[in-house]
Structures are given as structure tokens and as C-alpha cells.
Amino acid sequence: MLGEASINLVQLPTHCQSALDRTHPMPALSVADALRQICEIVKPKPAEELRLVDALGAVLANDVLSLRDAPPFHKALMDGYAVRSGDLTGSGQTLTVLEEIKAGSLPTLFLEAGCASQIMTGAPLPDGADAVVKVEETSRTEQQVTLLGEPVKPGTNMLRQADILRQGDLALTAGTALTATRLAGIAEIGPATVTARTPCKMGVLATGDELVPIGASPAAGQIVNTNEILLTNRIVAAGHRATGLGIAADNLADIEGKLRIGLEYDLLLLTGGVSAGVYDLVPQALANLGVNQVFHKVEVKPGKPVWFGQHQRPDGSIGYVFGLPGNPVSTLVCFELFVKTAANCLLGLPDPLPKSVSGRLVNAGANHGERPTYFPAETTWLDDHYQVRLVKWQGSSDLQATLEANSMALLPKHAGNIPAGTAVEVFFWK
Amino acid sequence: MLGEASINLVQLPTHCQSALDRTHPMPALSVADALRQICEIVKPKPAEELRLVDALGAVLANDVLSLRDAPPFHKALMDGYAVRSGDLTGSGQTLTVLEEIKAGSLPTLFLEAGCASQIMTGAPLPDGADAVVKVEETSRTEQQVTLLGEPVKPGTNMLRQADILRQGDLALTAGTALTATRLAGIAEIGPATVTARTPCKMGVLATGDELVPIGASPAAGQIVNTNEILLTNRIVAAGHRATGLGIAADNLADIEGKLRIGLEYDLLLLTGGVSAGVYDLVPQALANLGVNQVFHKVEVKPGKPVWFGQHQRPDGSIGYVFGLPGNPVSTLVCFELFVKTAANCLLGLPDPLPKSVSGRLVNAGANHGERPTYFPAETTWLDDHYQVRLVKWQGSSDLQATLEANSMALLPKHAGNIPAGTAVEVFFWK
């Protein structure tokens, strides 16, 4: 979540319903209002006790305190010789070598004046020592070591016990996402388990008689179910867990049967069946199964028919459902804006909103419409800024346009013609 | 790989060996030279036939051509009425409704003059039709539909067959990484399998008598094996496959036994045992097993002792081995710079080098040394640029410093004091 600015809810346009939109009495929401509703509705999922090795991508539900000092002892940072810095007089000085201390073993002898102990990186310093001279700056005979460089100061090439963190110190706060470095950091100073929320389990169910599975040859009028492979892989790439639930035909019985399975997931993503057509049976099936609508339709292009709801399971737990539009680019845009935000809320992240950067258009764009448009774009870093190339795109069903894109550029509503060089907000698909 | 500039090999400093470095006759390489050697040595792994659903993160070994037109038929982009645009005269016009065409079904009737057919998003247009009027812009009785808006032009709310891609067109070229959108795009227009190179399988083996596994209580002088959890999770986060191989003690027999298992992986990552200490047995064990050194030591801070080699297996295949320094931040830096580059070469990516952006320091830094320093940093997007905060960091064993960092900032060698506001190159840990 670091490294990118979040959508500013205050600056985004508020709701504006098209006068022609007469089929649904509920007004379409602005993107900002839809995001706000998601953040209000979606509660953090229950936390679990997780082994550190199973916790990548989970989010801490509790603070983590250090159970020990880091480092736990005065520690050599280089291979060389532990010395008493106060003894050192200058280059060419010779000291008697007492013993050899390797990492994992303990010193056995106090470091007397005029002495040194050979020491390996990571090993504990002997009592009496307060610095390490690098092996490269010494010359060794069997019993003695000659120092070739200038005298070193106390603390050179070593860390003192608790220099980095003291037992009981706060290491990480609740709400922190567990990256590789953070998991390793906890392993160093703390327990082998954490109390955290795991990445979300999401089910993906496509609806529509026109769909055939990948690998089948579509007959005339049929199309391949690309939304399942698109969504399951976006889910995995975002660090969550995905299960493809196949295709539900355009009839209530099939939709309801497959929905029952899907409602067990933290988040169920449906695609298709939420626009205004008479065969769009999904909202009805959801109502029959006790899934309550939170919103339907958002002023976003593509993706306007997006549907969001929640349901309570027999055990009292809450599940959430998105009905995403059937066209693949609409589904992608709604996943990036809305589904990922809901997943972030389930994880208990303190800043769940979509993250963006700004970049400069290298070609001209336009938005004469009444909805903000999230336009497929290839965004690349050039010297000191992102350059944003809007790809050739023929609308929400034009999945091929996304093959050369890695992001979506926000072209604000009523922007009119947008010349090359204009700064635009960009959301990476990553 | 999109969105970030690559290291410029030409601009980076060439080799500069410290006069004090007398323990290894081979001079340390510059970062650029080490990367160049990796790119020369590491060959793409064999390609496999992969099902699309198994191919996330794989890299195409062959071009992908479209096996069909996209879209495969003239296709409605909205729910509404298929019409003959030439028939339309103005608002209020009434047309006779012939039939209803849903997605997945075929039109049965030619669209005569004065007629319309109800059509759903994604459905094929009937012969004779050349545009779609949105349902929201119509009023319907049982047999007839009245158009409420202005006449539409040919092509409105529809795509013509092959508008996006024609059968036989080049869709994606060899060397392209398979993202969610690209997998969905291939599913739409092509085969259910691709010939591609899978993400790398990497084994991680830590060495050192001082190490104890996560969950064990370290005795005096011992430390937790944090490198395995650090590396395995960085590998997974980078899209590859990781196996932790545990800890090898500081004796040749144990190291060689565990190495034999590790050498089966595409890439074997060792940590510890490659600096100048007398207990650093790893190079010897590798030589005994027929792993040939490519380089040892790079002018990089932290991470100088990094070791790289290759070996040929009995079946003739080539494996690669990195010996990473034992200190965790050194291991992390070498993973980001060198291991990921080798993995990119194994995948056959055309631009395998580390990717960076530039940002402005928000606090002052310094590098008075002879090696470029990769300094843990928290990099965040602010308005129109990245701001880079160098975290408090006490050297290569200070893993705790990385908990609040998400990136490493390159402080060039001999830079001296670097004031806040200076532009620096940043490599994200992602």
C-alpha cells in the first residue's frame, strides 16, 4: 500500500444520474460514494493465529512487541578480531590471539589488555571487547595478529545488545500488511505465530447462456468465458485466493444452485447478469437467497451496472457479493476499484482505497460523457515521471486492448478533449 | 516489467577493487558487470506446453496468433434493439419488433425495413441490422418499440466482426509475461494452451552453526534463521516458486548433503558461508559438487561477498547457484539485484535487468565509501513524484530497519553528503 496516493473521496464528483436511465429507480452512485459505502459496510474478517511461514499477505490484527533484544548480544558485523579499542596505539601493533569465536558459539575467555580474539560475522563479542578489526586489515601468525590499519573507535564493526530494538518495544502495529521483510523481522524478535487476517478467499461465478469454457470451440453466437481466468488471476496477483466456480446458465435454478456454493466465500464475484436486460436474473436469484443489495449501478465507464450486496450466513458471519458486468473490461475496472477495496476492508487495512499515481499523457484522449472513464493505458517510467499511453480501445468488450496495457488512466467526466501532456491519474493493474 | 526504467549498464561504475581486499585474488565486480555476467551466463529454461489456467507469471516462448476473429460476429454492446440505421427518421419513430436475440442464441430473422429485433449485450446482430439503440432510449409495447432519442449512425453500440483482431493476426509475441489480462485475451482468441516458460523453482538453504529455526528459542550466541522466511516470501511475491531447505551446519558433509538436494532447483539460493571467514565452507562444498564459480564478490553495499556459479546436471541441464551473504539485508539486496535478474533470464524476458524509478530524498543521506549503497527506504507517491525517506539503518544485519521500508535507494559511491531534495534511484521490493 506504500508508494501510491489514495483516491480522495472529497474531490471526486458526487452522484449524477442520467435522465435517460429510467429502468432502475435507485440513482447510480459516484465512484467515491460507492467506495465510501463499501468501506462503511465491509467489516474486518475474523483474525486467526497464523504460523509466520503461512502469513505472507495477511494483515496483523494485533500489535507485535519484541520478545527479545535485537541483537540479543554484542555482535560482530565483520569477520576479524575482537579488540579493546582503548588498547590500540597505531598501525603495526601486535596483539596476542586468545581464541576463535565462530557464529553460534560463545566466547570462553575475557579479553585482557594486549589481546584479541578472532571472531566471525554474527558471533558474540567476548567480555572486555568493544570493537572489531576487519580481517582484511590484519596479518596473522599462529599466536599473534598484527593490525595493519589505523586504531578503531569503540563500537566499530559491531552492534551492541538491543542497539536496534529492546525487549518489549513495539515492532509492528495492527493493520500492517505482512511482507517478506516484516515476516523475517518478526521471526528475529518475536513469536513464531501472529494474530492476523488472511488474504481473502474469493469465488468467481460467470453467468450467461452465451458462455463456453476455455478450450471449448465457441459455436456461432457463443463466446469464451474469459472473465473467470481474468478475475481468478487478478485475485491471485493481488495476493488473495481464487476459486473458479464455472458458468451458470441464464435460469434461476442453475444460478441459485451455484450461488449457494459461492456464498461460502469471503467474497463472491459474479460476472454478467446485472445490466437491464430481461435475462439478467442474477439480482432476483440473490434476493431469493437472502443477499441484500447495498448498491446497483455506479457512474463509472466501463462498469456502470456493477452490483454490491451482503448476506448473513446461518452461523451469523457476513459475506459480500459483487455482481460485475459481463463485458471483460467492465469487470476488470470494477474489480480494481471496488472488489479490491472490499478485500482491503476485510483484511482490516487502515487505508483500503484504490491507490494511484499521476502521469503525463503521451497521446491525446477525450471524455465528452457524463461518467469518469477508466481507460486502458500503458504506463512506463521515463527519467523522472510516468508517461501514459492510452491504447487503442473499442469499449468494454474489447479485452484485446488490455494486452498492451498495464494500467487504467482516469479521464474525468465532461473533460472534453484532453491534449497530450495532460497530467492524469493512473491505477496500475498490479 | 512495464512502468519502470532499467538500470543503464553503460552509466554504472566499472570495477574498483579495494587495496585492502587481499583475501581473494579475483577482483570484485561492479554491479553492472555482475549483472552483465548473469545475463550472458543464464540461458532461458526449457519451454513447456501449459494450460492457460496454469500459466500466470509464465513467459511466452512462442508468438501467439489469433485463431479466430474478435469479435467472432457483429455484436451488440448494449441491451436494446438492433435496427437499420438508414431507416431511422427521428425521435418518436415506431418499429415492429421481430424477435428477441439473447446472448448465446442466434438471430433467426432478417431485419426488414421498418423492423427492429430486441437484442441483449453480447448477442449477434441479425443480418440487415447495422446499429443498436439502447433499451433506455426506447419505449416498448407488445409488438412495437418506439425510439425516444435521435437517429443513430451505422455501427452505434455494436462491434463488427474482426473489428478488434482478425484470424491469423499476431496477438502476443514471444518473451511476453502472461498477466491476468493477457491470459484472458488469449482465451478469447486462441488456443487453450501456450508454449511458455514457467516461473522459476528456487530452493533456499541457510548455512551456519549459529542458526536456529523459527519457533526455536535461540540460546546465547544463536540467532533465528530469518533468511529462509525472507527469501521464500520474496520469491513468492516476485511470482516464483520457493522451497525452504532448512539449515546446513558448518561442516562439509552436511553442506554437501543438503546441496545435492538444492541443486535440483532451477536456482539454488544459499545464505551465509561466502565471506572470508575460515568457517565459510560453502565455496569448497560447491566446488566438490561440480558447481563452477562465475563470480565471487561484487562492489555493492551491503552484499559484497555474493557468489554466483553454475553446474551441469547428469541429464545435461544447467542449474545456477547464488551464495548470498548471511546478513539479512545483504541477502535481500543481492536477491533484488542479482537473483531476480537471473530468474528473468531463465524466463526468457527480453529486459531482465532490475527496474527502478527516481524519487526525491526527504531526508539527507551520505555515502563516503567506495561501494554504491542500496539503502532501505520508504518510498511514497506524493502528488506528482516519489518521495524517498531513508530509514534509520544500522547496517547489513539490521533487518528491523526494513520493516518500515518498501524499497532501497541507491546512494552512489563517493557521493559524500547527499542533501534532502536530491534525486535518487529507487528499487521497490515488489
Image (tube, coloured by chain):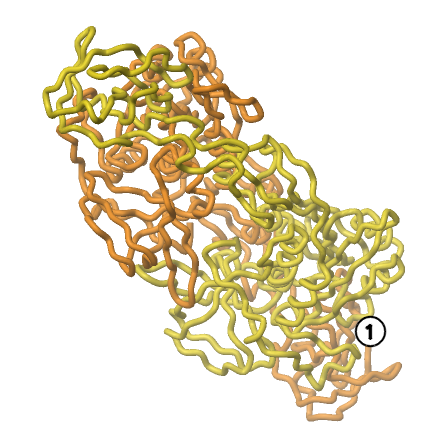
Chain colours: A yellow, B orange
Residue found at x 66% / y 82%: A16
Q: Provide residue B289's location: percent of width, then percent of height.
A: 37, 12
Is residue A212 positioned above or below A293 on the image?
above
Q: Report whether B70 appears left or right of A417.
A: right
* The quarter of the displayed image where residue A49 is located: top right
In what element is the residue under mark 1? strand
Residue located beneath label 1 in the image:
B99
Q: Amino acid at mark 1?
A: Glu
Q: Report whether B418 appears left or right of A234.
A: left
For label 1, the crowd category at 10 Å Cα-Cα, with few meaning under 14, some 14 to 19 and many 20 or more, is some
Say whether residue A44 is visible.
yes
Nearer to me, A154 or A247: A154
Q: Report whether A121 appears left or right of B156.
A: left
Q: Provide residue A133's location: percent of width, then percent of height.
A: 23, 24
Is residue B108 positioned above or below A64 on the image?
below
Residue found at x 66% / y 88%: B151
Is residue A34 positioned above or below B312 on the image?
below
Say whether residue B72 is visible.
no
Which chain does the numbered disc 1 sit on? B
